Amino acid sequence: MSHTVTTLFSGLGIGAVVHELDKDPRGLDMERDLARRLGRNPPVPAVFIGGKLVGCTDRIISLHLGGKLEPMLKAAGAMRV
């Protein structure tokens, strides 16, 4: 996960789980799938919230600035209400 997203989540009290694709034997296949789903290459970092693909760093920051990230995190049970 990018330093920006890690710092943002930490500031919100979120303990993010990071999955390093380069350390996973299926990482290349996962990276290809993410590239297809996100329409960008490289597709990482890709952020999932509540098991749903949300997007990359720019999408997370946009949601945060628009006031939509915290409600999404709360709905996923990642933040206290």
Image: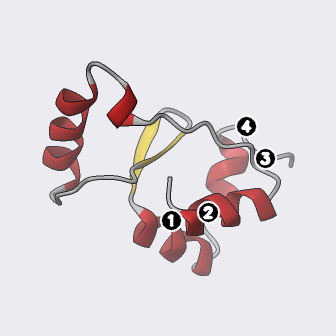
What's the residue at 68%, 66% (across, down)?
8
Task: Give residue 79's mark.
Answer: 3
Dots 2, 1 in contact, CB < 8 A: yes
Task: Give residue 20's mark.
Answer: none
Instruction: Locate residue 44, reporting x and y percent.
Output: 33, 52
Say which amino acid is labelled 3. Met
Instruction: Locate residue 62, reporting x and y percent.
Output: 49, 76
Q: Which residue is mark 2?
A: 69
Residue neighbourhood size for the residue with mark 4, other residues' Cα within 10 Å, grouped as few (<14), some (14–19), many (≥20): few
Query: Where on the picture, by quarter, is residue 15?
Result: top right
What's the residue at 39%, 50% (across, down)?
46
What's the residue at 57%, 79% (across, down)?
66
What's the residue at 33%, 35% (across, down)?
22
Q: Which residue is mark 4?
A: 77
Question: What is the C-alpha distance between the residues marked 1 and 4?
Answer: 17 Å
Task: Give residue 60's mark.
Answer: 1
